[in-house]
Image: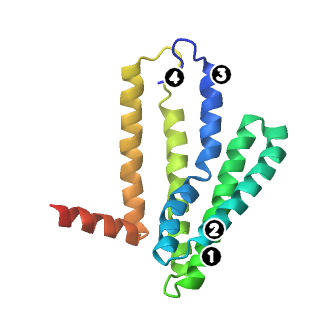
Amino acid sequence: LYQHSQFTHADTVNTASALAFYAIGLFAFSGVRITVPMFYAMKETRIPVVVSVASVIVNIALSLLFIRSLDFRGLCLAVACSGSLNFLLLLALLCRRIPVFSVKDFGRSIAKIVLSAIVISILLILGQRAIPLDTINGSILDWLVYTLVMLSVTAGVYLLIAKVFRMTELNSLFSLIRKSK
C-alpha cells in the first residue's frame, strides 16, 4: 500500500512506528466508546466530561515530555497513555456505580485477550521471518496475497486459542452468528 510515488521506505517505517504507538491505546479507545454511553444512560453526564478533561491535561503533559525523546512517536504514545487513563478511570467509576459489574471477570478476560495477542504477535513475527516478503520490489498482488494468508492463519490460531481459553466473548459471538441465520 505504501512506498509508491513520493512515499519512501523511511516514510513507511515512520508510519508503522506511529501506528505501533497508537495501537497501545486501541483497547482504551474502544472501551471509552462503550463506557461513556453507559454513564449517559444513567444520567451521569458530568463524570465522562471531567474524566475527559483530566485525560486531555495528561495528554498535553505527556506530549511535552515524550516528544523530546521519541519525536513524533512521543505524541502517539501520549495519546495512547492518556486514552488508557481515560478508559481505566471511567471503568473504575463505573464499577462503583454498578455493583454487578465485575472487575475481576473483566480482568480475567483482558488477561486472556492480551495473552492471545502476544501469541499472535509472536506467530506473525515468526511468519514474517520464515516467509519474508520483498517490500521494495514486490507487487501489490504479492502484498495482498501475503497479507490475506497471514491474517487467515493468525485469525485461525486466535480462534483456537480463544476456544482453549474458553473465552466467553467468543461463545457470545458464535451465539449471535447462529441467531442471525
Identity of the residue drawn at 32% across and 69% down = 172
Distance in Å between CA atoms under marks 1 and 3: 41 Å
Nearer to us: label 1 or label 3:
1
Quadrant in the rendering for residue 118: bottom right
- Distance Cα–Cα, label 2 vs label 3: 35 Å
Which of the two discs, 2 and 3, labels the residue nearer the N terminus?
3
Q: Residue at x 68, y 43 (%)?
A: 76
State the separation of the CA atoms marked 4 and 1: 40 Å
Mark 2 is on which residue type?
Leu
Q: Is residue 48 above or below residue 120?
A: below
User: Does dot 3 land on a helix, a strand or a loop?
Assistant: helix
Provide the residue designation for mark 2: 88
Compared to residue 112, the image places residue 14 above or below, namely above
Mark 1 or mark 3: whose residue is earlier in sequence: 3
Please tell me which residue lies in front, 52 or 125. 52
Q: Which residue is mark 1?
A: 92
Q: Which residue is mark 3?
A: 10
Contact, CB < 8 Å: mark 2 with mark 3?
Answer: no
Amino acid carrying label 1: it is Ala
Q: Nearer the viewer, mark 2 or mark 3?
A: 2
Q: CA distance from mark 4 to mark 2?
A: 35 Å
What residue would you read off at disc 4?
2
Q: Are marks 2 and 1 in contact (CB under 8 Å)?
A: yes
Bin the neighbour count of mark 1 within 10 Å (Cα to Cα): few under 14, some 14-19, many 20 and up: few
Instruction: Tell me the SS state at disc 4.
Output: loop
